[in-house]
Image (cartoon, rainbow, N blue to C red):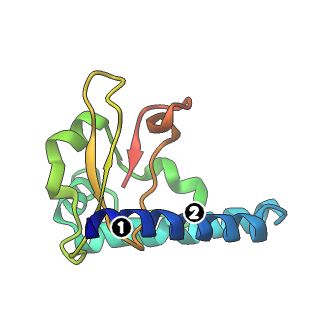
Amino acid sequence: MFLRFMDLSYSLLGMLRYYANYKSSCYLPKDKVRAYQYKKLKVIILTAYRDVDFYREKYVAAGFNPQRDFKCLDDINKVPTLSKDEARRAGALMHNPKHRGPALQFKTSGSTGQPYRAKKYPGVNGWLSKTWFGGTGNGRVIV
């Protein structure tokens, strides 16, 4: 019961935060939006590289160093990507060991034949390709 309450609380807080950010950013000039996107994505990529062995090994194997190779948003194509199958196989290896405590269970419906399950910790953001949410794209995930 307590965890369900936390799920609902985190969901509501997330929606309110998203709405507040949307209202303040929807009229920003394109260069400011891109700068904001770069800043947020850089933090995610550097955190994955620094804190999660799975991502560090993946980046090193691909010859990618985020401090050296990710200097602007256009460098996004240099970031090694992750397929759904690879994510399913890796499972908990993709979790940041610094994030502990209660987590929300994130799962897809399995419309491709296999549902995907992961944990979402409060205050921790990830960036998924829109393909995972029914849009068009290349079916890859960054970080």
Residues marked 1 and 2 touching at CB (< 8 Å): no
Q: Mark 1, residues whose alpha carbon is within 10 Å: few (<14), some, or many (≥20)? A: few
- Secondary structure of the residue carrying numbered label 2: helix
Name the residue tied to disc 1: 5
Residue drawn 30% across and 36% down?
Answer: 84
Corner quadrant of residue 115: top left
* Depth order, front residue of 13/138: 13
Is residue 103 something that shows in the picture? no
Mark nearer the N terminus (1 vs 2)? 1
Residue ID at (39%, 45%): 141
Number of numbered discs overlaid on the protein picture: 2
Q: Residues within 10 Å of mark 2 (few under 14, many from 20)?
A: few
Q: Which residue is mark 2?
A: 15
The quarter of the picture where residue 25 lies is bottom right
Q: Residue at the location (27% across, 21% down)?
A: 113
Front of the two marks 1 and 2: 1
With respect to residue 78, does 124 lie above or below?
below
**Residue type for callout 1:** Phe
- Image quadrant where one finds the C terminus: bottom left
Nearer to me, 56 or 84 = 84
Task: Report the residue at 52% width, 40% height from top.
Answer: 130
